[in-house]
Image: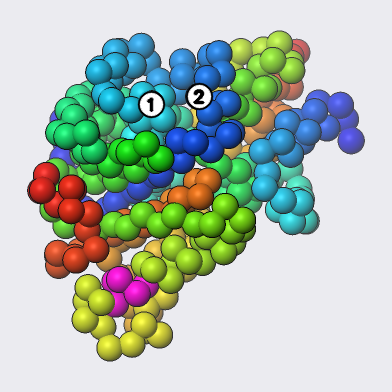
Amino acid sequence: MDTTKQKIIDILKKYTFNDEVWEGYNDDFHVVKDLKINSARMVDIILDIEDEFGVEITDEELDQMISVRDMLDLLKEKMH
Amino acid sequence: MIESPFMLIGNDIVALNEKQNLKSFDRPGYVMKFSFPSEQRRCKDIETNSTAFLWSLKESAYKLMQKYLTLVPFNPKHFQLTSCNQFSDAIINSSIEYTPHKLKLSALTHVNNEYIHTMAVLNQKHIKQVHYQIIKYAAKASQQEISQEIKNALIHNVSSDLRHNSTEKISITKNEQGVPRLLLNQTQGPDISISHDGEFGAYAYLSAHRNQHTNKEFDSFL
């Protein structure tokens, strides 16, 4: 697994209630719907991503942060 | 601004003493990430945690819009608080705009020292048809237990409200977006919304019938 993806998953794991939600994981998992993360934690996740990768997620980009793949694609775009 | 006739509801409860909430709400940059300074100024005189209040408003409105428009991206900045009035220590009446569609929503928030619970509707007139209950759980209860108990209480009260003969004919399922729906004999029943946070759970639904379970302080506002 590449480092960016591992870092994103480590961030998300801080906010999941149990390991069961990760069963059958794929990058298309929705953060709120599939990983059952409380939506109030989405703001924490965005702040964690900004801190970890030294990027800023704009208000417009919040729209794109639905699945893990969305997060990875956005980060790829911002870091290159 | 548009006001819709559709009878839809979204609710959200925030447990004020939940450790993760306290940590998040105090985190530098947190409030700015999901709200505007104008909104923070608008609710500065509200006698509760204003960050939790703003979050509860936006989340309840988001849950409602998920049903109205189906695919609504999660973006709390699309929901802007346009006015709020504290009716009493416990009740706050607010207006919210869903800015991409210039759609006006109304919300009622019930606050106390332990939680903030907001219910958003598309039309101010529907506030009178809101039924809700807040349930406090044992600290040890699992998320699944809490979720099941809220659903059971909701089914029981809808059944009693509609003078339904058997609770077996009422069920709660989720649609493809994960949004709960109440079915009466396999057909769409009143619109519902369910929320839980920490040791609190809450449900809300819209129905033409008034309900004995409606909170008394809230009732006096209506």
Residue B157 magenta-highlighted: yes
State which quarter of the image contains the N terminus of chain B.
Answer: top left
> Considering depth in this image, is A79 or B159 the residue closer to the camera?
B159
Picture disc at residue B201:
none
Please report the residue visible at 21 percent of the width from the left and 81 percent of the height from the top: B163
Q: Position of residue B160 (x, y in %)?
A: 25, 77
B154 on left or right of A70: left
Q: Position of residue B167 (x, y in %)?
A: 36, 82
Please report the residue visible at 39 percent of the width from the left and 40 percent of the height from the top: B115
Residue type at mark 2 is Phe
Picture disc at residue B49:
1
Please report the residue visible at 11 percent of the width from the left and 44 percent of the height from the top: B221
The chain containing the residue under callout 1 comes to: B
The chain containing the residue under callout 2 comes to: B
Q: Position of residue B140 (x, y in %)?
A: 61, 56
Q: Find disc 2 in the rendering and name its residue.
A: B25
* Mark positioned earlier in the residue sequence (1 or 2): 2
Mark 2 crowd level (few <14, some 14–19, many ≥20, 10 Å Cα): many
| Res B43 visible | yes
Would you say the residues marked 1 and 2 are in contact, meaning their CB atoms lie under 8 Å apart? yes
Main SS category, magenta section: helix
Instruction: Magenta stretch: give its range.
Output: B155-159
Quadrant in the picture for residue B189 = bottom left
Mark-to-mark CA distance, 1 and 2: 9 Å
B30 on left or right of B185: right
* Mark 2 residue element: helix
